[in-house]
Amino acid sequence: MKFLENITEKMEIDENSIEKIKERFWKIEGNDFEDSYVIYDCSKEGDKFDYQEYAEMMNLEEGISYQIIVFRNWECEIELKKEVYKKLKNATERKNLLRWFDRKISYYTELEDSIKLEVEGYGENYLEYANCLNGPVHSQKIIKGRIYNLTFFELKKIFNVRGKDLFRKNVRFGLKDNKIGNQIRIKFKKYIKTGIYEEWKKRNSGNSIEKIKEIIGLEEDYTEYLPENFWFYHNGVTVFYYGKANIDFSGTTIKLNPQEISVINGAQTITNFFEGMKEIEEDIENIKEGDFTEEKNSINKLKKYSVNYIEEVLKRTKVKVIFIDGEEDFLKPITYGLNTQIPIVESDIIADSKDVNELNEKLKRKSMKICKSGEEESIHTAFSLLDFVKKYLITQFKPGTSKNLQKKDLLKYIKEANEKIDKNTDIIDEIEKVVVIEEWWKSEKKERESFYGDAIDEPYLKYGKNYFESFILISNKEPLDDDSLILAFGEFLKIFRNMERNVSDKTFKQDSLFEKYQENLKKYQKNSEKYQEKSLVSKELKDELKACLNNKVDSKYKTRKIIVDYLNEKGINIPYFRVIAYTDGKPREAYPFPNTTFSELYKKGEEEEYLEYRDSLFCKEIHRKFPVFVIDWREDVKEGKRIVNDIFYLPEFTFEEYDASAKEVYESTIKAFEDGDENEFIKMGDGKDFHIRPKAVNSEDTFEFTNGRYITKRTFWANKTTVEKLISDYK
């Protein structure tokens, strides 16, 4: 077979060493039997990838150095992998498949000797530089460089017949489906989604134009990601050409042999852009009509024409491409020059020490790990050494020391943490809480500033994060959700403002103010208990609160702030409550449960079993009783604004009557984790009382799912109809 000849020639191996061991399987012993290769042929029309057959081969053939799978081209490879992936029914098999495809070498039968690339105009997008250089072998050699703007539509012609082999001579060739690559891919997908939206607008009109943004998951502020902006925001690509024949630069075309080039800079750019493109195609293919019941026609149309839209986006998205034409001797020094590495520092040595290894064994039960610089792990909470020690000190109520941590003290605190966690493993749970609070601190910055924006609060808003985290731990605040933490921050401000009026950044680099708080902790707790909850169903109080709300802006956080200020003014103590907004007698949105109810499923240790529903945080939240303010807004046509129509105060709101339904959704979610199939998560249109969907800072806020893919963080939600039924029962 032709591809066998080409593979053996490329690897400089005697073709007589090829042994056919099974239908579509060959084995090659390398030179001096140092390496061995297994080749699997999936290149013919209709060829399938047989998972079981391939798994048996991997188990039987011990000592395989390399796996080579033959496809027609890169797109055929992706489609074949997708087809097999969908048929697999559990997370382990899906993870195996992704691992095999990540480690294998691809060979494409449609690889040609010549490809023609189109460039725009002649001269306007073109720079040239040539020089005689003293090469590594001390001989005068000519090397030339030219710069063009190419579209991704043109680059795809090369990538489709070379795939990741295009980066073989790049020092960063080892591209994995890791978290960093995933974050890059998410950013690149924003350009493609924005382009799809714009192509849709050209061809459609009416309500579908806005609805299509929700369907494809395009964030509101998308203008930064117009395809034409890609050129400005991202580095270019460097292509080294070492062929015997020169590249043919003729007018508006570039003609070259794709087998004699290597991308020595920009591997991440090319790979993640095209893999992101394929992910979007798959996402569109998997859209269910039940999720958008009123948009059936738009969904069908999007599925039908999405490939055409994406092709137009590729033609609009340009990147700077440097073509270097020279002898292969120059390839390595140029590659290393483009990929200069960061030196090792002392913290890297400590991170690789016995003490840290022992700590990591203890952290493993919460799927946490202290990682060395640049280390990529399939772990849900990866700390740098410095970050871990800072969080540990916060659990020890030393927020100032944490903020002003000296690197020379890292080893001292690592040893201390090791000893203390041996005696008290609850410290690990406290570190996990600090992670949750810090996520809230980062994601809710704008809301926190709008809630507490007085000048006196500014130092706390800027520098008080570590102090606030220690405050939450020592106060045993629960649950750690957005509503609880924003209210707790108000309590934190109130206490610390009364203790010390003149604070600055230096205050928060010391522990003295927090020590003062600890000394008076019982007094502060006793004072907060003096307030009494009063009945909020009296007409007088409801009318007063309505008047307060109607004089302010209608927004979730402003509403909550107005209620908090009103309660404080009236001496009413309600330390935790939720606000549910209605419009014209109907809930505005579904009800989100704390992120921790879902994250405990993916943060469990590898050896741990999934919790039974009765032991889960989700069950705890279903049975929690807590106060709720229902604010029913209506549009006042005369005033031209929204006003409060009515207020209901429910002192003990709970979802516990929906316990059986919650249990069903929880167990269905565990099955999705076990199957490694995110499409199995219950959706809003599935007719259940609860569903699962993202509640992340943005689409880059991800976690590693059981199938090895990174997906957007999400949580459990109660459907709008569920909320409406419950509240109607209380009225």
Image (tube, rainbow, N blue to C red):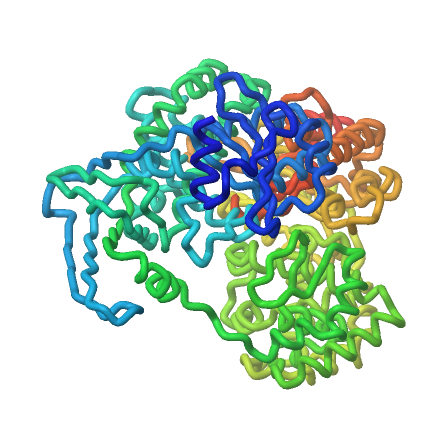
As drawn, 692 above or below 465: above
Residue at x 74%, y 56% (from the top left corner): 575
Question: Which residue does the image show at 62% across and 44% down from the upper left?
Answer: 713
Whether residue 675 is situated above or below residue 542 in the rendered picture: above
Foreground of the two, 214 or 46? 46
| Res. 268 visible in picture | no
Figure quadrant of residue 691: top right
Judged from this view, the residue extending furthest toward the top is 297
Q: Tell me how many marks there are.
A: 0
What's the residue at 80%, 38% (across, down)? Answer: 622
| Residue furthest out toward the front | 16
Where residue 18 sits in the image (x, y, percent)?
Answer: 56, 35
Name the image quarter holding the C terminus: top right
**Is residue 527 shown above or below 607?**
below
Depth check, front residue: 8 or 77:
8
Please state which of residues 538 and 411 is positioned toward the viewer in this rendering. 411
Residue 439, quarter of picture: bottom right
Residue 468 in sight here: yes
Q: In this view, does 675 lie to the left or right of 550?
A: right
Residue 3: x and y, percent?
45, 31
Residue at horizontal 49 percent and vertical 43 percent from the top: 13
Whole-percent x, y for residue 610 in the image: 82, 42
Horizontal side of residue 169 vs 584, given as left or right: left
Q: Which of 686 and 720 is in front in this view?
A: 686
Horizontal and vertical percent position of residue 250: 12, 40
